Image: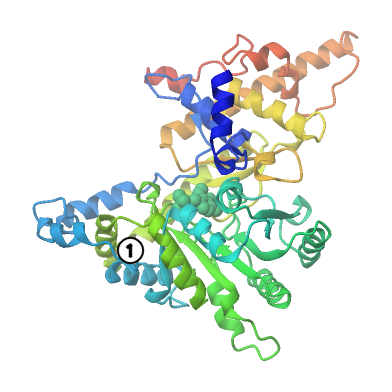
């Protein structure tokens, strides 16, 4: 104990500050999963991971392509001829073929309505690395960036932790489906000024994590006008650009920028606009760490490229992806089939929830839904949200992420990921939710009877009162006898 606190003083402020955000419930949920991970046969009562925004629905399509294209990898008999050249390559501009393939892919994902220049593609270690490099280019310590809430929790790490920049929330509300308004933008800007924070930019994720929604053209125009007027940067994280499975279509900031170039009423400075992209979601390749910064600003491209030495994409990965993404027929089929699968999974999951009277924010994109459990809270507070979250983790054994970890202003929202598991696991998760709700209703009936008998007089505020399960015992024992769900019949069938 003494040693560890002494050790803290030997480390840097960056290493020991708590800006990484690892102590939030978002990461706690992952820890709960790590301690007791669900497995259909080996640990059927374990925690199901629904806190991980990964697309595991389409790797078979890439595997098939690999089998047909062994030359794409330098680690096969057919591809080994390129081994020496590729293994030696270390230019931080990246392989031209890779940058060209990525630029074309980014255009294809945006319906070929806009073109990207391979010379503006800068590499990063995932969107994570690309975002941080961009922050190092745009911000000095303590400079502020406006970010609409709710937002991706790791922005706290990626944008702030090592750069020292600050995030100023733009408060978005459920009353208009969390859309950004001009008033909310202005008010966040004013708040920053009052707090003596120099605002350097506005950062959005479109499609949104955690909302799973896309921004319409008017909103994007409003953002462009706003940043142009204030002379600040606009960073658009478009990591889910192709993870759109329903109408309306995704509209990239690049398209709106292109359209506004011809607008005589307002002259937008393109040098203020930067896009973050990655193949982690759209191609389901988070392990490849392919992050891209695309900037319309020559100075940013040049500095970010120098910085990219700290997070380059391995030449082997670049070489492989140059082949894969240049196969237009494959890309076309992959994108179509992947969104079909996502759409199907989204439907199965949201319809399953609806059967229990649980609704989500209507969404057309992303790997998650934004689930509305506000009516399960005894009071609309974040303490109550945590009580419910612990119940879901410990008793229902689902790792979902509470809205507070996304800096949501309203308690009772949860992000639930649906694409990082197979069909059977989704069925089991839904079965657990059904059982939880069923048990809640049974308890409600019991409680009503008791109330009639004057045993229960007060505190029955919830109409949907699984809340009644919230006794201390239930919260404390992970699989208590009070567990609201009996072992799923699906699990029994499997074991
Ligand atoms: C909005 C957003 N940006 C960035 C990232 C990080 O992506 P990467 O794995 O490419 O670093 C994620 C991952 O969940 C994300 O949702």
Q: Place residue 172 in its image quadrant.
A: bottom right
**Residue drawn at 76 percent across, 57 percent down:** 176
**Residue drawn at 52 percent across, 46 percent down:** 346
Residue 397 at x, y percent in the picture: 55, 24
What residue is disc 1 on?
331
Question: What secondary structure is found at the residue carrying circle 1?
Answer: helix
Residue 246 vs residue 442, the one in the foreground: 246
Q: Place residue 233 in its image quadrant.
A: bottom right
Residue 345 vs residue 421, the one in the foreground: 421
Instruction: Using the rendered image of the protein, determine whether residue 247 is visible from the camera's viewpoint.
Output: no
Colouring mode (rainbow / by chain / secondary structure / one colour): rainbow
Residue 140 at x, y percent in the picture: 62, 61
Q: Is residue 378 above or below residue 447?
A: below
Q: Is residue 190 above or below residue 283?
A: below
Residue 178 vs residue 80, the one in the foreground: 80
Q: Is residue 287 left or right of residue 263?
A: left
Mark 1: C-beta under 8 Å from nearest atom of ligand 1: no
Residue 148 at x, y percent in the picture: 69, 56
Q: Is residue 164 left or right of residue 103?
A: right
Q: Given the current orientation, which residue lies at the most extreme bottom position? A: 264
Residue 242 at x, y percent in the picture: 46, 60
The N terminus lies in which quarter of the figure?
Answer: top right
Instruction: Using the rendered image of the protein, determine whether residue 128 is visible from the camera's viewpoint.
Output: yes
**Residue drawn at 82 percent across, 31 percent down:** 379
- How packed mark 1 is, by other alpha carbons closer than 10 Å (few <14, some 14-19, many 20 or more), is some
**Residue drawn at 64 percent across, 52 percent down:** 362
The C terminus lies in which quarter of the figure?
Answer: top left
């Amino acid at each position: 104990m003494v040693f560890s606190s002494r050790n803290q003083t030997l480390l840097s402020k960056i290493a020991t500050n708590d800006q990484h955000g690892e102590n939030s419930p978002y990461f706690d949920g992952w820890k709960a999963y790590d301690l007791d991970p669900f497995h259909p046969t080996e640990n059927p009562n374990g925690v199901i991971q629904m806190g991980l925004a990964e697309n595991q629905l389409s790797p078979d399509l890439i595997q098939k392509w690999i089998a047909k294209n062994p030359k794409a990898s330098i680690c096969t008999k057919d591809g080994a001829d390129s081994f020496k050249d590729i293994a030696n390559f270390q230019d931080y501009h990246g392989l031209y073929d890779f940058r060209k393939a990525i630029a074309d892919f980014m255009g294809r994902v945006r319906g070929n309505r806009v073109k990207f220049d391979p010379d503006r593609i800068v590499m990063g270690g995932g969107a994570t690395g690309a975002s941080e490099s961009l922050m190092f280019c745009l911000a000095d310590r303590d400079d502020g960036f406006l970010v609409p809430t709710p937002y991706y929790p790791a922005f706290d790490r990626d944008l702030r932790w090592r750069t020292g920049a600050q995030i100023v929330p733009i408060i978005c509300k459920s009353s208009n489906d969390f859309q950004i308004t001009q008033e909310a933008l202005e008010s966040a800007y004013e708040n920053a000024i009052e707090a003596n924070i120099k605002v350097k930019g506005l950062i959005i994720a479109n499609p949104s994590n955690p909302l799973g929604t896309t921004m319409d053209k008017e909103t994007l125009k409003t953002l462009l006008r706003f940043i142009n007027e204030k002379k600040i940067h606009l960073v658009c994280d478009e990591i889910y650009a192709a993870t759109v499975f329903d109408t309306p279509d995704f509209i990239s900031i690049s398209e709106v920028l292109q359209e506004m170039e011809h607008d005589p009423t307002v002259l937008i400075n393109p040098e203020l606009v930067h896009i973050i992209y990655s193949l982690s979601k759209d191609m389901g390749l988070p392990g490849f760490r392919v992050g891209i910064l695309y900037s319309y600003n020559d100075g940013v491209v040049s500095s970010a490229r120098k910085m990219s030495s700290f997070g380059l994409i391995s030449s082997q990965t670049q070489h492989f992806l140059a082949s894969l993404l240049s196969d237009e027929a494959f890309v076309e089929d992959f994108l179509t089939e992947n969104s079909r699968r996502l759409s199907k999974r989204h439907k199965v999951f949201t319809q399953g929830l609806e059967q229990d009277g649980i609704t989500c924010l209507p969404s057309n994109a992303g790997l998650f839904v934004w689930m509305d459990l506000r009516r399960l809270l005894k009071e609309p507070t974040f303490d109550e949200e945590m009580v419910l979250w612990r119940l879901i983790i410990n008793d229902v054994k689902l790792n979902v992420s509470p809205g507070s970890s996304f800096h949501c202003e309203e308690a009772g929202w949860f992000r639930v990921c649906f694409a990082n598991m197979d069909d059977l696991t989704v069925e089991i998760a839904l079965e657990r939710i059904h059982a939880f709700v069923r048990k809640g209703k049974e308890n409600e009936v019991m409680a009503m009877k008791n109330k009639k008998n004057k045993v229960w007089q007060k505190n029955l505020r919830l109409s949907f009162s699984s809340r009644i399960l919230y006794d201390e015992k239930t919260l404390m024992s992970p699989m208590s006898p009070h567990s609201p769900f009996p072992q799923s019949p699906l699990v029994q069938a499997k074991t």
